[in-house]
Amino acid sequence: MKKWVAALAGATFVFIAAMPAARAQSTIAKIVVPFAAGGGQDVLARVIAPELGAQLGATFVIENRAGAGGALGASDVARSKPDGNTLLMAASSHTISAALDRKTPFDPVADFTAVAHVGTGAYIFLFNANLPVKSVADFIAYAKSKAGKLNYASAGVGSATHLAMAYFATRAQINLVHVPFKSTAEALNSLIGGDTEALIVPTLGSQAFVANPAIRLLAVVSKDRIPTFPDTPTVNESGLAGFEFTSWFGLLGPANMPPDVTQKLNDAVARAIANPAVAANIAQQGIEPRPMSPAAFTQLLTDNYASMKKIVAAAGIAAD
């Protein structure tokens, strides 16, 4: 398998949008995932790649380029030829890292083309079951009575899980101690073990942990309730009006991609996630399929970057 992928990686890329159908069968393109295999973005890329290939008569190879919090893979894509054959499976971490001013070697908006939005991922609010709380409102009241004594886990300084809880604490006007880990799985295990007391985590990849009796799921951190946990209220409903934190997932390309190439890829993604089997698979990952035009995705990317910078400033999070 590795030899086959290596052979594909050495092939000459051609314009997807410009290729006639008969010749397009030999077209090879790649989707760069800026994190290790098995993560949320990797799973999503592997779900949609076969359908994209069928739509475009091409072979899409997934390339994991982990490092520097996602900046390594993103930088590779930013420097690639803007022909539509090298794409980045990006998520909110793309704008978060830049918002933290980690000296990222690219502008998360200007150095990319917003090709196609795939979907929106919700976050969930988890507590250790030993806490004497039954709602988000209870947690806020309890945290105020234990100022500076309650802690929360995250997948690392500057991660989305860190930003989400720091933002929540700022909005709720409570003082919590941050305990960073190296991954979401480690943060979840610390919560289960009772070493930490709260955690805001993506729905994607965390469903298996929710059934653990050591954890309580008390709210989802989105504007509306989600299909994955339809009976679970939102934070907005249960203790902090107007609060939400969600993640976007989408394909980005290098800046200055031709509009016709971008539109053809955008149309292909829209058709792919409209496929009931693909949509169901994406939904099982905790992501709501949500196609949008390149212009709308560009605006979302711009707004999200501005929003992340405001959250970082409000929460007083410093880059590591």
Image (cartoon, helix red, strand yellow):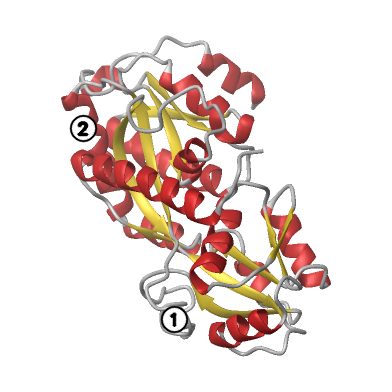
Horizontal side of 32 relative to 259 (left or right) equals right
Q: Secondary structure at mark 2?
A: helix
Observer-side mark, 1 or 2, equals: 1
Looking at the picture, tell me which residue is in the foreground, 253 or 152.
152
In the rendered image, the vertical position of residue 28 relative to residue 215, given as above or below: above
Q: What amino acid type should be assigned to the residue bearing mark 2? A: Lys
Q: What amino acid type should be assigned to the residue bearing mark 1? A: Pro
Q: Are marks 1 and 2 in contact (CB under 8 Å)?
A: no
Look at mark 1 in the image and give the residue it sits on.
230
> Which residue corresponds to the image point at 74% horizontal and 52% vertical from the top-left?
181
* Residue 68 percent across, percent down from the top left: 62, 30
Quarter of the picture holding the N terminus? top right
Looking at the picture, tell me which residue is in the foreground, 212 or 198.
198
In terms of image quadrants, where is residue 42? Answer: top right
> Which residue corresponds to the image point at 43% horizontal and 15% vertical from the top-left?
79
* Residue 188 percent across, percent down from the top left: 72, 63
* Residue 186 percent across, percent down from the top left: 76, 56
> Which residue corresponds to the image point at 59% horizontal and 81% vertical from the top-left?
140
Report the Cα–Cα distance between label 1 and label 2. Answer: 35 Å
Look at mark 2 in the image and give the residue it sits on.
264
Horizontal side of 179 relative to 200 (left or right) equals right
Which disc, if any, is residue 136? none
In the rendered image, the vertical position of residue 133 relative to residue 28, given as above or below: below
Q: Secondary structure at mark 1?
A: loop
| Label 2: few (<14), some (14–19) or many (≥20) C-alpha neighbours in 10 Å | some
Looking at the picture, tell me which residue is in the foreground, 30 or 156.
156
Quarter of the picture holding the C terminus? top right
In terms of image quadrants, where is residue 24? Answer: top left
Looking at the picture, tell me which residue is in the foreground, 45 or 197.
197
Q: Earlier in the sequence, mark 1 or mark 2?
A: 1
